[in-house]
Amino acid sequence: MIEVTKDLPRSADGLQMDWLEVPFGPVFPGLPGGLKLTLTLDGDGVTEGRATSLVGMTTEAEEVEGNEESEESEQINAGTFIEHLASAMPLAPVSYRLLACLAIEQGAGLNDDQATTQARNSGLERERIASHLGWLAQLGRQLGFAWLTQRTSTLQLQVRDADRNRLAELEPALRALGTRLERTPLLKSRLKGIGLLPPESSALRGPVARAADEGGDAWARLWQRLAEISASLEFIRSSGEPELASLRNIGDVSGAGEATVDTPRGEARLSLKLERGKVKSYKLDTACSHHIDLVPKLVEGRELGDALLAVGSLDLSPWEVIS
């Protein structure tokens, strides 16, 4: 036995045994589809890990060098660019549609319109509620809480296209969900201390960043998202009817624009150049592109179940991981 194991790595308990590299995903219960998590296991412990996206888009499109005809062929109609960006982000299409509209309109020199801005922001907050409900459904699958998965999935479908009156009708059910989670036995003990962010963590955005001030673990991230659901309901109640952003008339202008939108997972930033009303180049930065780098630190030295729960608590969208 000594001869067989003498060259194997030594575990934390002093035993020497094979370390296995095991993939989880791109389809795995409790993790978003398209995310590949690769963990090196020492028994049921994780020695190291990494996460990659199999569906993310490129971070930027550069200007094309060459004659005017070749540049024109690479330019994208503004409306087509908006649809492309929204469809590329299926977990937050409203947010990225708004982001593209704002950057293009800013590049065209258009001023803000208060009524339009309110309606757009109401649509953004409605998507935030639906997105957080989707994360709660995923959490339910990881914890084995079938009631949580079923209830939040149903509410998510009801919220997604609801008008302001319908959201008001759903508000009691949404608030009751938080109350039930608060009273769920052992939930706090299962999440407290899991996915604790290291003190040197940087580039945090959205709920992950805001929860860092309240403990920075999976438990804090749960309650941060529930608080955001309540805040979004209050915003919609006091603002206009939720609407999808649509591009205002920009004509054939040229210019440079940039915009930032607080998506359900954190700030996304887009800068672009317009030429004769078309998108010539762009650069995109998203929260998930930074948060995915937290995975190795969150899983190292954890038991497998805790490691998977920690990764899930980040609410990574593989489509929003930009390469």
Image: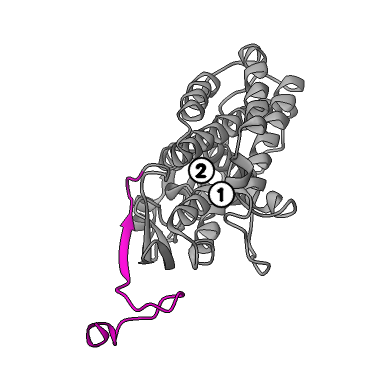
Task: Give percent across and percent down for residue 241.
Answer: 66, 18
> Does residue 103 appear left or right of residue 62 in this picture?
right
Residue 92, visible in the rendered structure: no
Residue that badge 1 annotates: 254
Q: Residue at x 27, y 86 (%)?
A: 2
Q: In the rendered view, tell whether residue 232 sits above or below residue 48.
A: above
Q: In the rendered view, tell whether residue 305 sits above or below residue 112.
A: below
Asked if the residues shown at circle 2 and circle 1 are in contact, with their CB atoms under 8 angstroms apart, the answer is yes
Q: Residue at x 32, y 72 (%)?
A: 19
Identify the disc placed on residue 277. 2
Predominant secondary structure in magenta?
loop
Task: Give percent across and percent down for residue 176.
Answer: 66, 22
Identify the disc placed on residue 107. none
Q: Residue at x 69, y 49 (%)?
A: 211
Compare residues 158 and 308 and report the one nearer the observer. 308
Q: Is residue 177 magenta?
A: no
Magenta residues span 1-28
> Does residue 233 appear left or right of residue 146 in this picture?
right
Compare residues 253 and 211 and report the one nearer the observer. 211
Residue lying farthest to the right in this orientation: 238
Q: Is residue 24 magenta?
A: yes
